[in-house]
Amino acid sequence: MSKSKKNVVDPEDLIERYGADTVRMFCLFASPPERDLEWSDQGVDGSFRFLHRVWRLVDENLAPLKSAALYTGDEALSAQLRDLHRKTHQTIKKVSNDIEDRFHFNTAISAVMELVNDVHKILAGAEKHSSLTWSVVKEAVEATVLLLSPVVPHITEELWKMLGHEGLLLEVPWPGYRAEALAVVKRLIVLQVNGKVRDRIEVPASLTEKEIEAAALANERVLSFVGQNPVKKVIVVGQKLVNVVV
């Protein structure tokens, strides 16, 4: 944008229309600091919609979020909850590194967006959510609010109060990540072609049978024994063995 090209956008108009937080988020998300900022109405709308999504996430689930105990890492989790717990701490680590070491708010914001998506996937599940589910979700939601606070201080301050906290969010210490939460639990899978063992691979324990099947069919040794033959059937046995029949 430049005055000579008469394409300057007045920030006061944007703040009046969208609010200061949306404008801040767009400016920080649209480009890293070493590059020029290219204006985009669609980008501003996207930032506005994301902040509304975060607001609704808290507002529409306020009662179970406030009553849930924050997950401490002691109880065993299902695969889905374990993935969300890991994602929360991966996001804390990435955002901390992106802001403190690289000063890249755009990638930090993107990481938080991914975490919010994962929270919504958990809450969209058909099963009734247990108290443990809400504990893990609460950990993710509070991390989201804390990690967004340098970018959008006004809405996060309100959300922090809504979640039942006293005092200013500004005075809350920056969250730390648990190294043990970042570890990916692996599962050893035996790969067979026509009943004969051809390879063994390690995959994340949270993979579904379909994802394990895809990993087996992408394996180089399996492909070498399959050759040009059409695959007739893929049998996944107890998430421990895959037999490719040709």
Image (cartoon, rainbow, N blue to C red):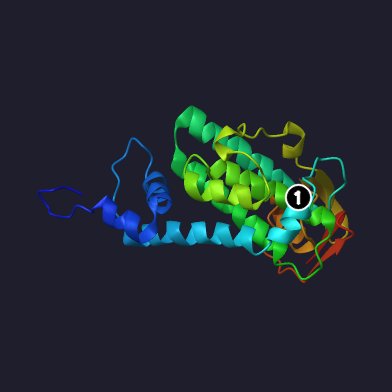
| Residue assigned mark 1 | 136
Of 12 and 168, nearer the camera is 168
**Residue 33 sits in quarter:** top left
Res. 226 in view: no
Query: For the point 71% across and 69% down, which residue is it?
Result: 230
Name the side, left or right, on which 175 lies relative to 209: left
Question: Residue 27, how many percent across, how many down?
Answer: 36, 47
**Is residue 59 positioned above or below 71 on the image?**
below
Q: Amino acid at mark 1?
A: Val
**Residue 120 sits in quarter:** bottom right
**Residue 40 sits in quarter:** bottom left
Of 115 and 143, nearer the camera is 143
Name the side, left or right, on which 2 lies relative to 140: left
Of 130 and 166, nearer the camera is 166
Question: Residue 24, how many percent across, how many down?
Answer: 39, 47
Question: Residue 205, how many percent across, how many down?
Answer: 80, 50
Query: For the point 62% across and 61% down, which residue is it?
Result: 59
Report the residue that reaches farthest toward the top: 101
Question: Residue 68, how many percent across, how many down?
Answer: 78, 52
**Is residue 220 positioned above or below 48 on the image?**
above
Query: For the point 58% across and 39% down, which residue is it?
Result: 169
**Is residue 48 positioned above or below 86 on the image?**
below
Number of other residues with Cα within 10 Å of mark 1, as a class: few under 14, some 14 to 19, many 20 or more: many
Image quarter of the C terminus: bottom right
